[in-house]
Amino acid sequence: MISANNVTLRFGKKALFEDVNIKFTEGNCYGLIGANGAGKSTFLKILSGELETTNGDISITPGQRMSVLEQDHFKYDSYSVMDTVILGNKRLYEIMKEKDAIYAKEDFSD
């Protein structure tokens, strides 16, 4: 589970959001919608730990992780869909590529 507790983000005196409380529970699917500039990407950066809050905290259940892809329309064009999804977890992607390199050797097989 990922939860945001009393999360506030301010830029100077202007609050982008204030006292946000939400729990993302296992087994559910969530969507984040809103107008351009409303703070959707910023909130996801806070959830992933890329950006610090002004107030409040984010907690992730021990043993769980959050994978993130950058918001770039063309960055992943040269990758398959599966590779793009796995790229959200860089270490897992590196391990997958190491495995593929080993299996590609003549003297190795599945």
Image (cartoon, rainbow, N blue to C red):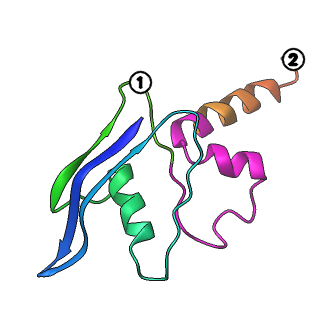
Marks 1 and 2, Cα distance to the nearest angstrom? 32 Å
Badges 1 and 2: C-beta atoms under 8 Å apart? no
Q: Quadrant of the C terminus?
A: top right
Please tell me which residue is depicted at 21% across the width and 63% down the height of the picture: 8
What is the tally of numbered marks visible in this picture? 2
Residue 16, x across and y down, in percent? 27, 75
The magenta stretch is 68-93
Give the residue at mark 2: 109
Q: Secondary structure at mark 2?
A: loop
**On screen, residue 92 above or below 23:** above
Three-letter residue code for mark 2:
Ser
Residue 36, x across and y down, in percent? 48, 83
Main secondary structure type of the part rendered in magenta? loop
Q: In the rendered view, does 4 fall on the left or right side of 10?
A: right
Please tell me which residue is depicted at 70% across the width and 27% down the height of the picture: 99
- Specify few, some or many for label 1: CA neighbours under 10 Å numbering under 14, 14-19, or 20 or more: few
Please tell me which residue is depicted at 60% across the width and 47% down the height of the picture: 87
Report the front residue among 68 and 7: 7
Give the residue at mark 1: 63
Three-letter residue code for mark 1:
Gly
Q: Secondary structure at mark 1?
A: loop
